[in-house]
Image (spheres, rainbow, N blue to C red):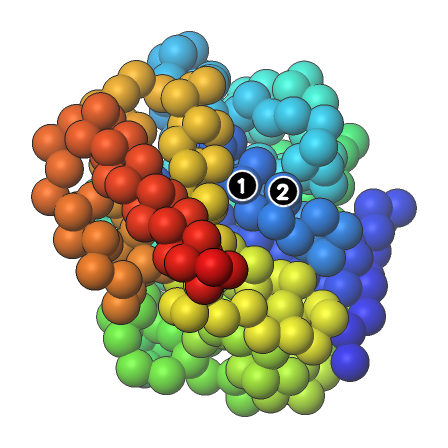
Amino acid sequence: MLKSYKIRDIEINNGLVLAPMSGVTSRPFRRLIKLYNQEHLGLVITEFISVEALTRNVQKSIEMMRFTEAERPFAIQIFGYDIERMVTAAHMVEQSGADIIDINCGCPAPKVVRKGGGCNLMREPNHLKEMIKAVRKAVSMPLTIKIRSGWDEKTKNALEIAKIAEGEGVEALAVHGRTRAQLYRGDADWNLVADVANSLKIPVLGSGDVCDRKSAEERLKYGIAGIFVGRGALANPLIFKDIATNSKTDIKSSPSMAIEIVEKYKSLLQEDFHDVACVGKIKQLSSQMCRGFPWRKEILVAKNLPEIEQVIIKVKESINSNQTQLAA
């Protein structure tokens, strides 16, 4: 079912990509997903990084570009409106040693589109064309973009934008089958994704509503090169392995696996973030992955990292006690 595809000479195994998610796909999360999926995950992408912040040397944004060799193939996604700053930021991405640079043309967040970035770029095809042309001229690394189906139901122009991108040297693109107006509500329009894929020569990936092997199989029938998986990786961090190997990891019936993942994520987070940030991100993962476990609420109401650590210890002790009783 699954096939690899190439972005220039970079092979993306199984066509599977960890989608960029703002506030989620930080370095610790990418490393966690890579760790549990290994060769079954073809590409990881950073959460989007503002070109305004990068070109002003905001340390937090520069840190967001950091990655480990284990994350390769690795793409950095940037967003913004100003072409000059986009070019400067592209140079910074190339200097970072990343494999691919991706321009976000699909984010629906008000704070992004108000400043002209994200999905707003689809409303200005001429400006976007000049932006892509300038970036393509400025860097030699592979260039990709991510778009939506359009701004709203009346202006679904994904195919127009995709053809512009291909004409200006973009080497692969992803289409999220929802409009900006939909945000993340309703069903993604995969027929539109298929129209784009069938009209271009470059690899086209689809995004939207892929949460397991079955939904991945259904989406791949649309003739796309591969799929982006975003929120599904929060609910099941082993989703890429499951899709690639036709298996089903039932985390809901495996408290030992769930708490192992939480503990590993905590460890990875502590390498990069201060304790307060670690708490928020652990809760973010646990709220999705740990549904159904009685101790999920204890993690979600924890006030600090030591309280979360105590929950982890208690859960592990309970699991060990139950296993000892079963063995007796």
Place of residue 195 in the rendered image (x, y in percent of width and height, measured from the top left):
62, 84
- Depicted 240 relative to depicted 109: above or below: below
- Assess disc 2: are there few (<14), some (14-19) or many (≥20) residues with their C-alpha within 10 Å of its C-alpha: some
Which residue is pictured at 37% across the width and 83% down the height?
187
Place of residue 39 in the rendered image (x, y in percent of width and height, measured from the top left):
76, 51
- Assess disc 1: are there few (<14), some (14-19) or many (≥20) residues with their C-alpha within 10 Å of its C-alpha: many
- Mark 2 lies on a secondary structure that is helix
Place of residue 279 in the rendered image (x, y in percent of width and height, measured from the top left):
25, 32
User: Residue 80, which numbered label?
Assistant: none
| Labelled pair 2, 1 in contact (Cβ < 8 Å) | yes
Which residue is pictured at 46% across the width and 45% down the height?
260
Along the viewing direction, whichever of 274 and 86 lies nearer the viewer: 274
Query: Residue 19, can we see it?
Result: yes
User: Residue 35, which numbered label?
Assistant: 2
Q: Amino acid at mark 1?
A: Leu
Query: Residue 78, can we see it?
Result: no
- Mark 1 lies on a secondary structure that is helix
Q: Which residue is mark 1?
A: 32
Which residue is pictured at 30% across the width and 17% down the height?
274
Which quarter of the image is occupied by the N terminus? bottom right
Place of residue 70 in the rendered image (x, y in percent of width and height, measured from the top left):
71, 32
Along the viewing direction, whichever of 301 and 49 lies nearer the viewer: 301
Q: Distance from label 2 to label 1 (Cα)?
A: 5 Å
